């Protein structure tokens, strides 16, 4: 076994959100595979179904690459995460992808977990996982501790894709990971992120394998473009409410309007928060519309990244959205 996998593109990818029963998510994955998607990344939230159970079920039903998107190394110990991904690598015959990110601060807070030193935590998790997959016994004392930890079974290493948005995480991912999942849906944000990625690649060690940059975009697709935009309001509310001021300024979004959305989300007034999302927020933080509109936006995104992962909500009708996505992918 080598220490690092040869990176085989996981794009185009699709995010599966297990808010629905596993028996409903798996047929959606099968439909996505027929539409031309290469990978299925399962979102990780404690209030939904277990992402590894879902990923395993999808891996058994399809030939897609599968994995968490993105696991965080706070609500589970990094060694346990490495073991779970290794198990998925075994059950899928080598088709596992380790999507890794710091996690949502508000969600972690609900579990009483403090998100300390997120960049360092993600980097250490990446390094420890790779050592475990190589069959090493690991002693580690950093943002987490491990003493003589090892996996008592052998697997080939899985590629690590780091979810990133800020400049430091983007640079770190480009320097150390196999790929990056850029949390952005607009070419303006991806152009900025591409520069940060290039800075990290310039410092990438010469013995590192290939690297892939992907836009992890919030996509909403329907024959009726307005219905698609309406369906994008929930994820956009969370994105806009947590967006940094420089990001808001980049898109000319009123800071007070974004603060209003943030306050409503924090209070749990989600219906009002979704209604408070402005057209400029939808334009900035989602790829939403009819197939022609979505195709054009994706072409613009591809100017700055190697590929795209279609993130939630997919559309007002996920089944229809996945079928329509097949025509979009064929145009691309």
Image (cartoon, rainbow, N blue to C red):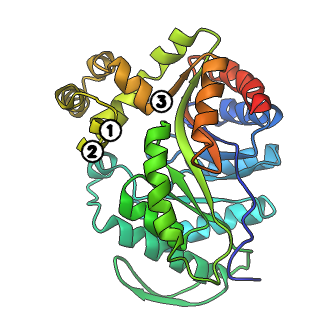
Q: Are marks 1 and 2 in contact (CB under 8 Å)?
A: yes
Q: Residue 250 bears which disc, if any?
A: 1
Q: Residues within 10 Å of mark 2 (few under 14, many from 20)?
A: few
Q: Residues within 10 Å of mark 1 (few under 14, many from 20)?
A: few
Q: Are marks 3 and 1 in contact (CB under 8 Å)?
A: no
| Quadrant in which the N terminus is drawn | bottom right
Residue 314 appears in the rendering: no
For disc 3, the marked residue is 286
Secondary structure under badge 2? Answer: helix
Q: CA distance from mark 3 to mark 1?
A: 15 Å
Could you tell me residue 294's position as x and y percent?
A: 61, 25
For disc 2, the marked residue is 246
In the drawing, does residue 156 fall left or right of residue 41? Answer: right
Secondary structure under badge 3? Answer: loop
In the drawing, does residue 228 fall left or right of residue 275? Answer: right
Could you tell me residue 200's position as x and y percent?
A: 48, 69
* Nearer to us in this view, 229 or 133: 229
Residue in the picture at 29% in, 30% down: 252
Residue 108 appears in the rendering: yes
Secondary structure under badge 1? Answer: helix
């Amino acid at each position: 076994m080598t220490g690092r996998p040869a990176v085989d593109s996981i794009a185009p990818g699709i995010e599966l959100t297990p808010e629905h029963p596993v028996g409903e998510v798996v047929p959606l994955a099968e439909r996505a595979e027929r539409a031309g998607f290469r990978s299925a990344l399962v979102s990780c939230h404690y209030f939904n179904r277990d992402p590894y159970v879902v990923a395993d079920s999808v891996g058994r039903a399809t030939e897609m690459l599968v994995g968490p998107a993105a696991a965080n190394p706070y609500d589970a110990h990094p060694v346990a995460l490495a073991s779970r991904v290794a198990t998925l690598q075994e059950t899928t015959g080598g088709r596992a992808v380790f999507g890794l990110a710091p996690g949502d601060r508000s969600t972690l807070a609900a579990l009483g977990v403090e998100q300390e030193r997120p960049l360092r935590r993600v980097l250490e998790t990446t390094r420890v996982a790779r050592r475990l997959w190589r069959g090493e016994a690991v002693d580690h004392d950093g943002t987490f501790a491990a003493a003589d930890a090892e996996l008592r079974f052998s697997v080939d290493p899985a590629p690590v894709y780091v979810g990133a948005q800020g400049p430091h995480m983007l640079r770190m991912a480009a320097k150390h990971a196999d790929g990056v999942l850029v949390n952005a849906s607009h070419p303006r944000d991806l152009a900025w992120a591409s520069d940060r990625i290039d800075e990290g690649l310039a410092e990438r060690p010469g013995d590192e394998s290939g690297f892939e940059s992907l836009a992890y975009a919030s996509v909403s697709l329907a024959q009726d473009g307005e219905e698609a935009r309406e369906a994008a309001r929930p994820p956009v509310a969370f994105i806009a409410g947590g967006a940094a001021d420089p990001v808001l300024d980049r898109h000319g979004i009123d800071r007070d309007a974004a603060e209003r959305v943030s306050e409503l989300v924090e209070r749990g007034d989600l219906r009002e928060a979704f209604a408070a999302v402005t057209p400029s927020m939808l334009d900035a933080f989602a790829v939403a519309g009819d197939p022609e509109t979505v195709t054009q936006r994706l072409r613009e995104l591809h100017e700055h990244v190697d590929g795209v992962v279609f993130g939630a909500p997919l559309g007002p009708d996920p089944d229809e959205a996945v079928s329509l996505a097949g025509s979009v992918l064929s145009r691309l």
